[in-house]
Amino acid sequence: MRGESADRLMDIILQMRINMAHINETLQLQTFEIGQELAGIFEDQKKSLDEYLNAIDAKLKECAAQIDDYRRVYATLAGVRQKLVQLGSAPSPLPVPLPSESTEGVLLWRVNELKEQGKL
């Protein structure tokens, strides 16, 4: 009887080891699959951030072009205003001149202006 009990216990232990091996294999497979899925999500979000930076870069280039246009039109307007004064006219005051020669300085000034106005 004891021999049969020992055999039965050995069979149970063997079955438990087989089950544990299966559970371990399943766990490793699921861990790998989740890792792959997370890596895909990471890459997608990384790509999104790159696209955001590219869009910001494009807007900054557009801003730099607008700043150059503002300077050009401002200079033209100042010349026209000077001619009006020479002709004896009292022209309107000029718009705000840009406070900096650098694009970075103008952008910083404008951001601060918008913050002060509560627009940013």
Image (spheres, rainbow, N blue to C red):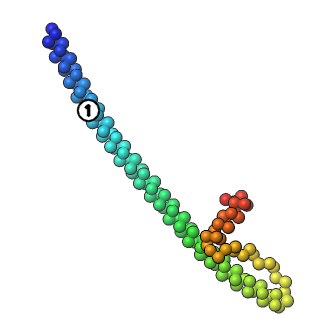
Side of 21 relative to 30 (left or right) = left
Q: Based on the displayed image, in which of its 4 quarters is residue 71 positioned?
A: bottom right
Secondary element under disc 1, as helix, strand or loop, is helix
Does residue 28 lie above or below 9 as drawn?
below
Q: Residue at x 51, y 62 (%)?
A: 53
Which of the image's four quarters has the N terminus? top left
Q: At label 1, which amino acid type do we have? A: His
Circle count? 1
**Which corner quadrant of the image does residue 18 belong to?**
top left
Please tell me which residue is depicted at 64% across the width and 66% down the height of the picture: 108
Q: How far across and how far down the image is residue 82, in percent?
A: 78, 87
Q: Is residue 44 above or below residue 108?
A: above
Q: Which residue is mark 1?
A: 22
Give the residue displayed 69% in from the left and 74% down from the top.
98
Say whether residue 88 is left or right of residue 66.
Answer: right
Q: Residue furthest bottom?
A: 87
Q: Is residue 15 above or below residue 112?
A: above
Query: How many neighbours does mark 1 have within 10 angstroms: few (below 14), some (14-19), or many (20 or more)?
Result: few
Residue 31 position, x and y percent, is: 34, 40
Q: Quadrant of residue 120?
A: bottom right
Seen in the image, is 54 located left or right of residue 101?
Answer: left
Q: Position of residue 9 (x, y in %)?
A: 20, 17
- The correct choice, above or below, for 24 with respect to 52 in the image is above
Q: Residue at x 61, y 70 (%)?
A: 104
Tell me residue 26's x, y (percent).
29, 36
Relative to 34, 115 lies left or right = right
